[in-house]
Amino acid sequence: MASTDSPWQTIIAAALLGSERQPFQPPIAPGQLGQVLSQLCGRSTEAALLSAAATVTLHHRVGWLPETQAPDSIEPVQPDDLPRCNPLAARYLQQILQGQYSSLLSEWLEKAAQTEQRVPEMLLPALLDKGRQQRELRALILPVLGHRGRWLAAQNPDWSYAIALSTETDWETSTPAARLLYLQDLRSHDPDRARELVQATWSQETASDRVKFLETFRIGLSLADESFLESALGDRRSKEVRRVAFDLLASLPDSRLCQQITEHTCRYLSLQDGKVPALKVLLPEQLDKSLLQLGLELKPSTAVNSTLGEKAWWLLQLIGATPLSTWTEQWQMSPQAILKMTQSHEWQTVLLHGFVLAAKRQKNAEWLEVIFKRCFREPDLSREIALVGLSIEELFNMLPAASRDDLLIYLLQIAHTKIKDSLTIWLLRYSPQQWSVDLAQLVLTCLEEQISATTNFSNSDWELRATLKEFARFIPVSLIPEVMQLRIKLLDHTAWIQSIDDLLTLLQFRYEMTQSFEAGSRR
């Protein structure tokens, strides 16, 4: 390389000076380069200069060697302890990953985990990419990757969420995404260990990571977490950390925070004697210093609540952190009766928002169900509860699975809600689990009745027809014969036949996909 520096400088100098001022003489160079350059002497000055430049440039390129670097040391993958799923199940997964029935990916992953089978090697990259794109799938992907899948994830930073954490060193050095997913999984089966890991590195974590790690405590939350959450409540570095810690402690009715707040709340909210029970409300004149230390806020925290006066805001926070059992036991009244007393009350907004916030935090199924039914009957109430960050759809999904099915049956059968209603379609379409046989049969009956009564298409008909195929994710596959009967009964309603055929196709695919796991697995 160095031997060509001098010839190249000679060529540059000649070019800058110009061939008219000084005739160009090809530079002298050692070896074969010099032999080629010497052959240019008989050419014109311009041709010799350009040819020499081209020759030396080519010589530079031919002589260049790329930098070398020692290969990374990659640990060999361990043998898998899970059997590979059989080719038939793999074929269904491949179709799903290619986008043909992408809505069924969660169900395939759940079925593979239930039967303790892993994803075949050739489909691992596509599946890991899905997890990169859709965070909600990650917890379902991890159990079916096997050792090879986790090993492969370690080779690509985009798949770091799937790296296995097995030691405390892994916990301290892995990526934030991998640590967060690991915590979420650990909280589901060993919350004490998860808490210990967070405690060990808490002081070194960034404020945003501390908030994310605290949010995982919603999984498996118990009084065992109380002491740590109380320490987080005193975090001086982050208001958001304090807010999440307060919210978590307020979700534990038996926590010291809830007990202390209850003492204050009972001073301002009581049952007024009389023929008709009524709520007596007093607003706090000032916010006790001890309540500020517990985490209550002086000023409304959101633009929505900024319409409330300070004292009303203080009372709302107190009610929202008081165990709901306080009122049902103390007043010997049902949630329905208590909520009824808030109607037309001077402080209806404060009371309603406070009770809804408490029900949301405590996941009290009885209260949530009463609130849901009222919201469905009173659209204005739905808008009210949205002000405390709880939509009617979120409220529905917070209910236990059995309650959700019972409520949908109530809406369709007792409240005579049309299946074409936009909210009903939403509740059916985004149900977090498969419908019960009773609910699915009722949906099919309602579909037959309401489609048979259709004369002219309305917007709700178009919405239902576009959504019908998605119902196949929730209908038990054992009801395929009933869906086929529905198609026969509605043959005269040609506008609906394609949608029903799409529903049947997806339902049949689900059945065959489920059956494929019964065919056995392979090592």
Image (spheres, rainbow, N blue to C red):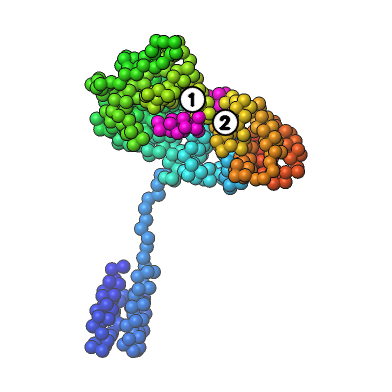
The circle drawn on residue 433 is 2
Q: Which part of the image, by quadrant, shows the C terminus?
A: top right
Q: Which part of the image, by quadrant, shows the N terminus?
A: bottom left
Which one is closest to the eye, mark 2 or mark 1? 1
Q: Position of residue 476 (x, y in %)?
A: 65, 31
Q: Position of residue 433 (x, y in %)?
A: 57, 31
Classify mark 1: helix, strand or loop.
Answer: helix
Instruction: Give me the C-alpha separation between circle 2 and circle 1.
Output: 22 Å
Residue placed most toward the observer, 460 or 247 = 460
Residue placed most toward the observer, 337 or 392 = 337
* 380 part of magenta stretch: yes
Q: Residue at x 40, y 22 (%)?
A: 345
Q: Residue at x 32, y 27 (%)?
A: 313
Residue 22, above or below 192:
below
| Number of marks in the rendered image | 2
Identify the mark nearer the N-term, 2 or 1: 1
The circle drawn on residue 464 is none
The circle drawn on residue 371 is 1
Q: In the rendered structure, which amino acid carries the disc numbered 1?
A: Ile
Q: Which residues are magenta?
A: 378-405
Pointer 1 local density, CA inside 10 Å: few below 14, some 14–19, many at least 20: many
Q: Residue at x 37, y 69 (%)?
A: 61
Q: Residue furthest front?
A: 275
Which picture quadrant has residue 9? Answer: bottom left
Q: In the rendered structure, which amino acid carries the disc numbered 2?
A: Gln
Residue placed most toward the observer, 242 or 196 = 242
